[in-house]
Amino acid sequence: MISVFFQYDFLTYALYTGIMVGFLAPVLGVFLVVRRLSLIADALSHITLSGIAFSLLLGRHYTMFAGLNPVYMGSVFAVGGALMIERLRTVYTYYKELAIPIILSAGIGIGVVFISLADGFNTDLFNYLFGSVVAVRESDFHLIGGITIVVTILLVLFYKELFYLSFDEEQAVVSGIPRRFLHFLFIVMVALVIAASMRIVGILLVSSLMTLPVAAAMRLAKGFKQMFIYSVIFGQFSVITGLVSAFHLNLAPGGTIVMINVFILLAVVLLTRKRG
Amino acid sequence: MELLQQLTFLERGIIAGLIIGFICPLLGAFLLVRRITIISEALSHITLTGIAAGVFLSQTTILMGMINPLYTGLIFSLAGSLLVEKLRQIYKHFQELAIPIILSSGVGLGAILISMSGGSYNEWYNYLFGSIVTVTLGDLGFIAGTGIVALIILLAFYKELLSISFDQEFAKTSGMKVTRINFFFSLLIALVISMSMKVVGILLVGAMVTLPVAASIQLAKSFRQVVVLGILFGQMAMIGGIYFSYHLNVATGGMIVVTGVVILILSAGLKRFRKGLA
């Protein structure tokens, strides 16, 4: 089943990228879920769509941008969107939770306008939305590899601070941890991981790879470390089986990956319910 | 009836748009004060699954061939709204996880069904991003019908909904059947989302529910004002969006949302300006 993935270059790239994504997304997802920010991933992934559409539009009019990987513009927009969310939270002091739906819908809306201006309603867009096994190119592989290395280094360097901030924000601030800087850094990491995962899982499904494995792990794990381990195991399992089955059944890999995650989650919920 | 049949495709689209621009902000105001605007995103993504299932079934079985995928969309969004409540009970300490779980499984299953049913990409883009020119007479009937049902529910339970939205505890102690009202509320959300989908598109329904009230709450001084201004902004976004999308040849749903965003920015600016004067 899986051997075919080593016969063709593009499938090998897809598999390796999948493994990297299946590691990164759940790891950041743990912090997201614990900090109760799981919805931010949805908002940022939707605004990534506008970035990609903008890049496609620029590419049609300026040759300079035609060669640029749309993933770059996507991550720029995601970081911008994250800053906008923070800004909106100060505008709506009483309804802070409004910031996310506003950014989410504005992201898709602007994206759609850019796409129709670029005449981009074609197969490519479908791959961006729902992921694709065959769309991963060598340049994507290198870009995603780079993102994986950078994010991993940052996570190792700032693990303690992020951990502290996630569980006791007040205490962390009092003991001199630069909250604003760390929060910004964290959001940038999330934006980068979303941009990296997009090729395989698709924009609309990136956030699920960040939240679903963690939601399942949360019910099993007895500590923070165990949560990481379970989430990464679930993430890897879903990405690899999802990719292989998507290829053989000719389905969108984003869909299969997410549905495997949903089944894992259901199984875990049933299992832990009996125990409880 | 004859009058209805004489409508051009554009007129049908505009009428549908105006109905949606009226009901979406009305519901949005309740979602806003209950702090669950995000639920509209989750349910709209579940509706995608329903539509995909409807299209898939209509291709594979003869019996389902006649049924408008909008109906399967409605059934799925209804089931989704009940599921959200259930999941909130399971994840007691992380209630906000219920929404991402529903949202992602909705799109995930939808993506699989879409790739299984094949079909032209354009048809799917119409469902995802909305299209004003594909509103058929049957769709208009569906939109008007669900709109009327939604309006009846809203008017019949207006007081109860208002009281639950602002203070659920108080509503409970004063003898209101909270679970039943909540059920009707879920029904209402599901109805509004599935009716809006054809014109605004699945991915953008949430915008129509959120953006007008997000703008109106900047300026309004009471709940009634939030509702009235919200409806006004909703209609403006609809009409502006349809007008510009027709002339610039851009996807309708996108342009409606962009108009909504512009209104939001303007009203936020106006609030600042007022504050500056005072």
Image (cartoon, coloured by chain):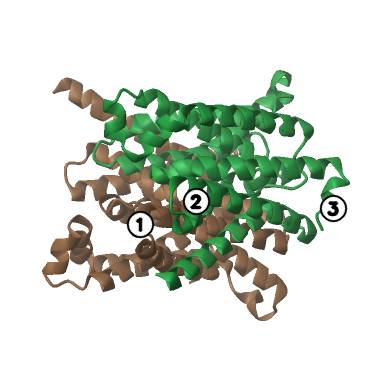
Q: Is disc 3 on the same chain as disc 1?
A: no
- Left or right, B35 with respect to A266, comes to left
Seen in the picture, residue B109 relative to A18 is either above or below; the reply is below
Q: Are marks 3 and 2 in contact (CB under 8 Å)?
A: no
Q: Residues within 10 Å of mark 3 (few under 14, many from 20)?
A: few
Seen in the picture, residue A251 relative to B60 is either above or below; the reply is above
Q: Position of residue A76 (x, y in %)?
A: 55, 26
Kindly identify the amino acid type of the residue bearing the numbered disc 2: Val
Find numbered disc 1 in the image and state the secondary structure of the residue it sits on: helix
Residue on which the image places disc 3? A3
Residue on which the image places disc 2? A214
At 38% from the left and 60% from the top, the residue drawn is: B91
Looking at the figure, which quarter contains the N terminus of chain A?
Answer: bottom right
Looking at the image, which residue sits at the far top? A64
Q: Are marks 2 and 1 in contact (CB under 8 Å)?
A: no
At 69% from the left and 23% from the top, the residue drawn is: A61
Chain in green in the render: A
- Chain B: drawing colour: brown
Residue on which the image places disc 1? B23
Q: CA distance from mark 3 to mark 2?
A: 29 Å
Find numbered disc 2 in the image and state the secondary structure of the residue it sits on: helix
Looking at the figure, which quarter contains the C terminus of chain A?
Answer: bottom left
Find numbered disc 3 in the image and state the secondary structure of the residue it sits on: helix
Q: Position of residue A23 (x, y in %)?
A: 61, 43
Residue closer to the observer: A166 or B226: A166
Chain containing mark 1: B
Residue closer to the observer: B142 or A261: A261
Chain containing mark 3: A
- Left or right, A32 with respect to B109, comes to left
Q: Position of residue B221 (x, y in %)?
A: 17, 41
Kindly identify the amino acid type of the residue bearing the numbered disc 3: Ser
Kindly identify the amino acid type of the residue bearing the numbered disc 1: Ile
